[in-house]
Amino acid sequence: MMPQSTPILQAKAVTQRFGRFTALKNINVSFDRNKLTAIIGPNGAGKSTFFNVISGAFPPTEGQIFYNGQEITGYKQHEFARIGISKSFQITNVFKDLSAHENVRVANQMRTSRYNILTPRGNFKALHAQADELLEKVGLSKVASKRASELAHGQQRALEIAMALASTPELLLLDEPTAGMSPEETVFMMDLIHRLSQERTVILVEHKMKLVMGICEHLIVLHHGEFLAQGTPEEIRANEEVRRVYLGQN
Ligand SMILES: Nc1ncnc2c1ncn2[C@@H]1O[C@H](COP(=O)(O)OP(=O)(O)OP(=O)(O)O)[C@@H](O)[C@H]1O
Ligand SMILES: [Mg+2]
């Protein structure tokens, strides 16, 4: 058993350079198990870059990533999925010509068929039932048979989360899940994320600080690629430096 005190995810001295530009400078942060944590910061702070590093899109230029105390720096994308880390991107990433239900089934099948050489046909029923359950969870049961391209933007993002959940991850990573959403869709998505975080660890990237204040237990603030602050919503709200970098922003 993993001691409860071992962070689920840890970044040690993470630096990311793109050519001569340094997008992340020596970031040291730990993420607690079973918490809903948000990485916040103004536009261009390095949030998506950090998200990419901790979700395995690319390894950091320098530094290390640990998952449940085990170093995973340099692991490939599919290895992240196998060990229990799943993500959805800032940009919607669904198969537009497939139905919502088919999208979830494909996401699940990609996981099972990659690691089992034989995917028994008996699994079909189980896949179907799991897709039903996941679509229900994200509020898409009514549009299960609609093509993804026909869904509203917010519904496509919800579908993407259902796909990310198909591998039953221990850790779910979300990059700006409310990007481009209407106020109603945003409220629904925040509520969904809060519900999902009751069952697993969720790390969320968001540039609108106010949005995450109500639901997150812990916040990590980046600014110009540097770690600025971390703490509870109350602590972050009261932090002078955070207030300064967010001045004039929403
Ligand atoms: N692949 C890349 N090549 C060069 N520069 C990059 C690359 N990716 C990001 N950057 C730069 O790194 C900085 C941080 O970008 P990043 O996308 O991580 O910010 P962000 O905090 O996610 O911003 P936003 O709130 O707009 O999503 C920006 O100046 C960006 O231009
Ligand atoms: Mg971003």
Image: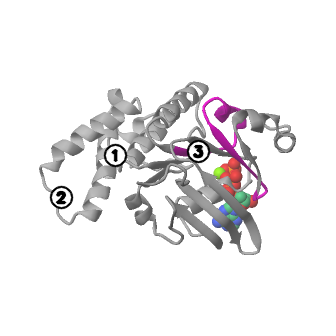
Examine the rendered structure and indicate whether residue 120 appears above or below residue 242: below
Residue that appears at 50% across and 47% down: 92
Along the polypeptide, which appears first: circle 3 or circle 1?
A: 1
What is the x, y in percent for residue 174? Answer: 54, 46
Give the side of residue 6 with respect to residue 231, left or right: left
Q: Which amino acid does the dot numbered 2 rest on?
A: Thr
Residue 144 sits in quarter: top left
Residue 35 visible within the image: yes
37, 164: nearer the viewer: 37
Quarter holding the C terminus is top right
Question: Disc 3 marks which residue?
Answer: 204
Q: Circle 1 sits in a helix, a strand or a loop, which is it?
A: helix
Cα distance in 3D space between marks 3 and 1: 23 Å
Mark 3: give few (<14), some (14-19) or many (20+) Cα within 10 Å: many
Question: Disc 2 marks which residue?
Answer: 119
What is the x, y in percent for residue 15? Answer: 70, 68
Dot label at residue 103: 1
Q: Which amino acid does the dot numbered 1 rest on?
A: Asn
Q: Which amino acid does the dot numbered 3 rest on?
A: Leu
Q: Tell me if residue 156 is in the magenta stretch.
A: no
Residue 119 sits in quarter: bottom left
- Point out the stretch of residues depicted in magenta: 202-226
Dot label at residue 3: none
Cα distance in 3D space between marks 3 and 2: 33 Å
Give the side of residue 242 with respect to residue 11, left or right: right
Examine the rendered structure and indicate whether residue 99 appears above or below residue 106: above
Quarter holding the N terminus is bottom left
